Structure formats: structure tokens, C-alpha cells
Image (spheres, rainbow, N blue to C red):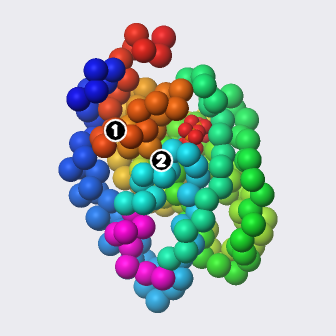
């Protein structure tokens, strides 16, 4: 285990199992359809790679970059979308993919942005959900795990751009982020 990790919250094996279940559910729910997985960078990159390989559908992968935390551990409450969407959304089935749903600010803003372009459908999928932290009411359509209100890192999640490569989700030791 990484020396800065306090505790492993979701192991590599648990995540792998849960993603298989999510992939099977999505495959069933979208049977016969084409699905656009729209990943919210950077945190989603590991989850999306694994989830996509567990979905047995005609899938298109797209990304956008959104950021609200920067190098701080506190949400700024403002979402920066760094690139304009440069692919067709109108009339297509879109699923936003996130590593974590926290205050709900990011997904609320992105959902509104995507809906403006009139998709056939829009759903959201997050690996982790921290309901205790919610500031804007938001429920994801697909959730991997409900997560305790701790500083989580690994499996795509960072602190100051570090730890994204850990193969599990863990809590970060207080002395590292305080
Ligand atoms: C994280 C995460 C979500 C967002 C969720 O992104 O990836 O996009 O915060 O938080 P919210 O529900 O409070 O809006 P972050 O800004 O840390 O950027 P990153 O994905 O590049 O790490």
C-alpha cells in the first residue's frame, strides 16, 4: 500500500467486480442502441477505460475536461469546462462518466450543457458517490459505490495530480492534505 494512504476503501478486486456488474447493466439497458460515453477528465480516465471494456455495445468514447478543485482540496463551486464539445450530441444516447459525484456542482453544470444540444437521452454514471457532501441535489443513474466522506485518492482520483495511478481507492492521510 502507498505510504500516504490511510486505508483502502475499495480494493482493486472489489472495483473490478462492481464494474463488471455496471457494464452488464448498461449493456442490458441500452440493448440495440449506440451509446456515447462522455468522460469527464481527468479523474474518469481509469474508470472509463475499465467500464467501456465491460460494455458489449456499439460504443463511442468522447471526453471533455472539467475542473473545479485545481490544486486545492476544497471545491471552488465553479466549473471550468476547458474545451468546447466538438462532436455530435443531437439525437444521440449520451452517458456522462465521472470518477466521483461530490457536491454535485460539476455534473449539474455538465448535464445542463449537454441537454442544450438535445441528445436523444442523457444519463450519468459515477464510480463513487459521496452523498454527505452534496450541495446541489443530484442522483446518478449508475453508481459504483457510495463513499464515506473522506479524502479519497487512487483509481483516477488525485491530490495535486498525484496518486491517480493507484489501482485501488483509498483515503489519504490527513497530514498529507492538511
Ligand atoms: C473532480 C471529479 C468530478 C468533480 C466532482 O474533478 O472528477 O469532476 O470533482 O465534484 P463535484 O460533485 O463537487 O463537482 P476535479 O475538479 O478534482 O478534476 P480532475 O477530474 O481533473 O481531478
Give how far apart the Cα atoms at labels 1 and 2 are.
Answer: 14 Å
Residue 142: x percent and y percent?
44, 59
Looking at the rendering, which quadrant does residue 118 occupy? bottom right
Q: Residue at x 72, y 75 (%)?
A: 88
Q: Is mark 2 within 8 Å of ligand 1?
A: yes
Res 10 seen here: yes
The residue identified by callout 2 is 99
Residue extent of the magenta highlight: 51-58
- Give the left or right position of residue 81, taking residue 149 as reference: right
Q: Residue at x 26, y 56 (%)?
A: 16
Q: Is label 2 in a helix, a strand or a loop?
A: strand
Looking at the rendering, which quadrant does residue 8 occupy? top left
Looking at the rendering, which quadrant does residue 3 occupy? top left
Q: Is residue 79 above or below residue 3?
A: below
Q: For the residues labelled 1 and 2, say whether their Cβ atoms are less than 8 Å apart.
A: no
Residue depth check, mark 1 versus mark 2: number of the one nearer the observer: 1
Q: Residue at x 55, y 68 (%)?
A: 61
Residue 27: x percent and y percent?
39, 77
- Give the left or right position of residue 39, taking residue 117 as reference: left
The residue identified by callout 1 is 166
Amino acid at each position: 500500500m502507498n505510504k500516504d494512504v490511510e486505508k483502502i476503501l475499495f480494493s482493486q478486486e472489489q472495483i473490478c467486480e462492481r464494474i463488471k456488474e455496471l457494464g452488464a447493466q448498461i449493456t442490458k439497458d441500452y440493448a440495440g442502441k449506440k451509446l456515447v460515453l462522455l468522460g469527464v477528465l481527468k479523474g474518469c480516465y481509469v474508470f472509463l477505460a475499465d467500464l467501456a471494456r465491460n460494455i458489449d455495445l456499439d460504443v463511442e468514447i468522447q471526453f471533455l475536461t472539467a475542473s473545479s478543485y485545481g490544486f486545492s482540496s476544497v471545491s471552488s463551486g465553479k466549473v471550468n469546462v476547458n474545451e468546447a464539445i466538438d462532436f455530435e450530441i443531437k439525437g444521440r444516447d449520451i452517458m456522462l462518466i465521472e470518477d466521483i459525484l461530490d457536491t454535485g456542482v460539476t455534473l449539474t453544470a455538465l448535464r445542463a450543457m449537454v441537454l442544450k444540444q438535445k441528445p436523444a437521452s442523457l444519463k450519468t454514471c459515477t464510480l463513487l458517490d459521496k452523498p454527505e457532501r452534496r450541495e446541489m441535489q443530484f442522483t446518478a443513474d449508475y453508481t459504483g459505490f457510495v463513499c464515506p466522506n473522506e479524502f479519497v485518492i487512487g483509481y483516477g482520483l488525485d491530490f495535486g495530480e498525484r496518486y491517480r495511478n493507484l489501482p485501488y481507492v483509498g483515503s489519504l492521510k490527513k497530514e498529507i492534505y492538511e
